[in-house]
Image (spheres, rainbow, N blue to C red):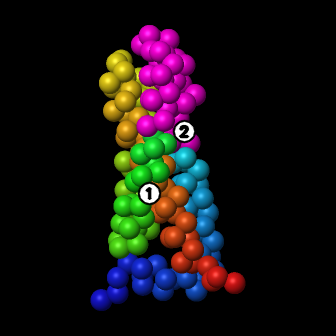
Amino acid sequence: MPNNRQKETRHANSSWARWYALFAATLGMAATFAIWGALAPIASIFQKDLDLNNTQVSIMIAIPVLLGSVMRIPLGILADRNGGKKVFLILFIFSLPPTLVLGNMVNSYLGCIFWALVLGMPGTSFAIGIPYVSKWFSPE
């Protein structure tokens, strides 16, 4: 029985499929990077509404970046084992709730920190998308 890597590689000869994979992965990474960076532009609103100092705002902005950097390794391993398509889809679905909740339902600094942690996960899409697409194209 072929594993997920073999299934993805098997279809690499199809020209339209590889360009579709590249296009879909590019759009997916653009969307997840937009979600990943969503906290910084609205941080000043949280600072004013929650009466936060500059240090608290800096920590809140840094958390998604740090978590995204650290979690790239385990999610890259998951993508290698289970296939990039499946892991990317799960990551994308996981990325939607913080996008919807962050601006509307956060009313405390602890809530900001929690959703900042969740927002760190979309930053791992690079470790999933690049290996997935690279399987569709030859190295030359």
Q: Looking at the image, can residue 33 be seen?
A: yes
Q: Which mark is residue 102?
A: none
Label 1 sits on a secondary structure element that is helix
The mark found on residue 72 in the picture is 1
Viewer-side residue, 71 vs 30 = 71
Residue visible at 33% across and 26% down in the picture: 111
In the foreground, 88 or 121: 121
Badge 1 crowding class, 10 Å Cα cut-off, few under 14, some 14 to 19, many 20 or more, is some
Q: Earlier in the sequence, mark 2 or mark 1?
A: 2
Residue appearing at x 36%, y 18% in the figure: 107
Q: Is residue 15 above or below residue 21?
A: below
Q: Quadrant of residue 1?
A: bottom left
Tell me, yes or no, if residue 105 can be seen here: no
Q: Which segment did they paint magenta? A: 34-63
* Residue at the extreme left of the image, as rendered: 1
What amino acid does circle 2 point to? Gly
For the stretch drawn in magenta, what is the main secondary structure? Answer: helix
Quadrant of the rendered image containing residue 75 = bottom left
Seen from the viewer's position, the closer of residues 63 and 19 is: 63
Q: Are circles 2 and 1 on residues that touch, CB within 8 Å?
A: no
Q: Which residue is mark 2?
A: 37
- Residue 108: name its quadrant: top left
Residue 77: in magenta span: no
In magenta stretch: residue 38: yes
Residue 44 placement, left or right of 60 = right
Q: Position of residue 94 (x, y in %)?
A: 37, 48
Counting from the top left corner in percent of width and height, residue 66 is at: 45, 44
